[in-house]
């Protein structure tokens, strides 16, 4: 097995979370492998939460591609290329499968491995790999990553459940009492769920003795979070970075959220998590983690308030029985 590995999984947040179990898979085969991770800067806190990753290399391609006429942009890209070459990697594993990811994977000047043309998201990218593997497209994203790496490094795909290996940093903000989390915002309007439904979920959390904490990430999302919190006597934290938000998720009694990166991160911590899907099927990227998790909804199937609350009741009832 190569001694120095670079994993390329740059975005988005949920995709980065789904790739994390490969680190423990690899290290259980050989503990002396050094693993670095190339990721978009806003999501760098996620691989930084894994003790098995030696170095996280943040990049800003989303910013750079809109500022290619600036000398500063090219200077930053040159700096990243230098860092990639200095890694002297034996192998680069491109788990992203896009032209943008293979561009940076090859900048490390090491053999690059990834999905073959039938398995990859952008088939043209596979032409730039030295090694390719066939992985069924119908697998969940977590299993696709695990299977690709196992095949490439020559070990049997572990039968065990995925181990995300994430340890949240110490909290910088704490709710005033035991709490549950609501995540009502998403990157696209098509993912959103009606505001009045969120208020109903928050009220049920309050009845169970949990303070509803409503998360937000952008200025445009804060107003919605505050309205929902006002409707269910909840709380809204100040602006929190990804790592700071992770600590809030890790301490929650329960999380109900849209199909967004923070919901997937909550499940990776083993917290009871319910994911609401409004614009695509959850099958290939459903909520997964070591705790009680569930997904509801799908493309053209916006779940009703009654169905979400019923699933929430089943989850919380099971938790009460376990206690």
Image (tube, grey):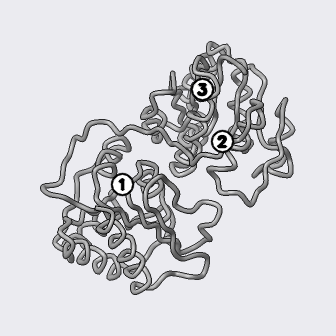
Q: Which mark is residue 260?
A: none
Compared with residue 115, is residue 231 higher up or lower down, i.e. above or below? Answer: below
Q: Marks 3 and 2, how far apart in space?
A: 37 Å
Q: Secondary structure at mark 1?
A: loop
> Which residue shows up at 31% across the image and 76% down it?
201
Q: Quadrant of the N terminus?
A: top right
Q: Quadrant of the C terminus?
A: bottom left
Q: How many marks?
A: 3
Q: Earlier in the sequence, mark 3 or mark 2?
A: 3
**Residue 228 horizontal side relative to residue 176, left or right:** right
Q: Residues within 10 Å of mark 1 (few under 14, many from 20)?
A: some
Q: Secondary structure at mark 2?
A: loop
Of tags 2 and 1, the one toward the viewer is 2
Circle 2 residue: 158
**Residue 168 horizontal side relative to residue 234, left or right:** right
Q: Residues within 10 Å of mark 2 (few under 14, many from 20)?
A: few
């Amino acid at each position: 097995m190569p001694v120095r590995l670079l994993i390329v999984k740059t975005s988005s947040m949920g995709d980065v979370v789904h790739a994390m179990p490969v680190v423990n898979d690899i290290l259980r085969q050989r503990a002396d492998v050094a693993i670095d991770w190339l990721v978009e800067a806003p999501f760098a806190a996620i691989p930084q939460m894994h003790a098995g990753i030696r170095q996280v290399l943040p990049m800003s391609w989303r910013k750079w591609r809109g500022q290619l006429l600036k000398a500063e942009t090219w200077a930053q890209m040159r700096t990243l290329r230098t860092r990639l070459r200095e890694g002297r990697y034996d192998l680069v594993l491109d788990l992203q499968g896009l032209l943008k990811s293979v561009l940076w994977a090859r900048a490390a000047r090491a053999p690059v491995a990834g999905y073959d043309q039938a398995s990859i998201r952008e088939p043209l990218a596979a032409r730039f790999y030295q090694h390719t593997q066939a992985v069924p497209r119908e697998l969940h994203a977590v299993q696709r990553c695990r299977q690709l790496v196992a095949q490439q490094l020559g070990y049997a795909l572990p039968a065990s459940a995925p181990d995300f290996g994430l340890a949240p940093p110490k909290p910088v903000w704490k709710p005033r009492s035991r709490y549950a989390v609501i995540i009502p915002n998403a990157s696209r309007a098509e993912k959103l769920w009606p505001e009045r439904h969120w208020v109903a979920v928050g009220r049920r959390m309050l009845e169970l003795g949990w303070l509803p904490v409503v998360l937000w990430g952008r200025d445009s999302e804060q107003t919605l979070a505050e309205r929902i919190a006002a409707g269910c006597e909840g709380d809204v934290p100040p602006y929190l970075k990804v790592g700071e938000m992770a600590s809030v998720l890790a301490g929650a009694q329960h999380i109900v959220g849209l199909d967004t990166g923070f919901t997937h991160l909550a499940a990776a911590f083993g917290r009871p998590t319910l994911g609401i899907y409004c614009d695509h099927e959850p099958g290939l990227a459903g909520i997964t983690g070591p705790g009680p998790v569930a997904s509801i909804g799908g493309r053209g199937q916006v779940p009703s308030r009654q169905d979400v609350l019923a699933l929430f009741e089943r989850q919380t009832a099971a938790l009460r029985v376990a206690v």
